[in-house]
Image (cartoon, rainbow, N blue to C red):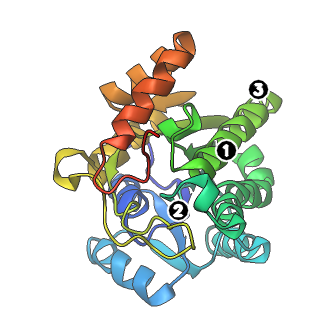
Amino acid sequence: MAMKDKVVLITGASSGIGLALASRFGLSGAKLAVCGRNLPVLEAAIAPLRAKGIQVIAIQADVAVQEDCKHFIEAALTQYGRIDVLINNAGISMRALFRDTQVEVIEQLMQINFMGTVYCTRFALDALLKSKGSIVGISSIAGYRGLPARSGYSASKFAMNGFLESIRTELLYEGVHVLTASPGFTSSGIRNKALSADGTPQGESPLDEGKIMSAEEVADHIYKAVVARKRTLTLTRQGKLTILLNKWFPAWMDKIVFNHFAGEPDSPLSRK
């Protein structure tokens, strides 16, 4: 198996895509180090993986905190002595008009989604240069097309995409693989935890979660992209079409995207 005995680090592994990635890489023979903000919740989530014989250590870490990220990377190196794959998965979303949103909500999104990726990548980089390993960022279609009522989320993912493209170019001849993975809408719980204008979780999803791609499907695609050392991965027909049409017909896409999100249940968008 391609990932047998490789050391894979995954942030935000307590649920959703992060947990599905831990299972997919672990079942392929990888040794795992995972982190989450709530250690008891993280331990409970990965208990079934350990029951299957997957080697995994769990570290409490909030990726918005630089020292937590450093501790996570150092704990993995202490345990395994190397890093082969770093998956920057931890993230949070939002749903509110910018004019209604507290600035602190935008700061929180940038700190978790963008700076968390920067912190972990910086502290793991020397080890990844030694192993000629992979840096993965779990981005979004929102990192290519700004989405209404998700200004902070889109901004953080645009920042992640630019960061990954920059370091991919810097490392072009040093053997380190950099993958930007952009799932479409995924049944992962991220919308239930998305922040409202005042920073409280919205508590429910505006989508029918049963009709969108599962976290396990997304994890399988990402696993295969890492093995193949792909540059980018964009999932779902809708996601690929959105990026393509936005490149060639941006003004028209403003209207299409507005109308799409205005049609959500309880959408904050309205025409005046």
According to the picture, the residue beneath numbered tag 2 turns out to be: 92
> Element under label 1?
helix
**Where on the picture, by quarter, is residue 188?**
bottom left
**Earlier residue among tags 3 and 2:** 2
Locate residue 149 relative to residue 19 in the image: left or right: right
Regarding residue 230, the answer to whether it shows in the image is: no
Q: Residue furthest bottom?
A: 40
Q: CA distance from mark 2 to mark 1?
A: 13 Å
Q: Residues within 10 Å of mark 2 (few under 14, many from 20)?
A: many
Q: Earlier in the sequence, mark 2 or mark 1?
A: 2
Residue 160 circle label: 1
Res 236 quadrant in image: top left
Say which of 80 and 33 sits in front: 33
Q: Label 3, label 1: how many angstroms apart (C-alpha)?
A: 18 Å
The residue sitting at the top extreme is 248
Residue type, numbered disc 2: Ile
Q: Which residue is mark 3?
A: 172
Q: Residue at x 27, y 52 (%)?
A: 207
- The residue under the point 59% across, 61% down is 100
Tell me which amino acid carries mark 3: Leu
The extreme front residue here reads 272
Give coordinates of residue 48: x percent, y percent. Answer: 27, 76
Check disc 2 and report its element: helix, strand or loop. loop
Residue 31 horizontal side relative to residue 215, left or right: right
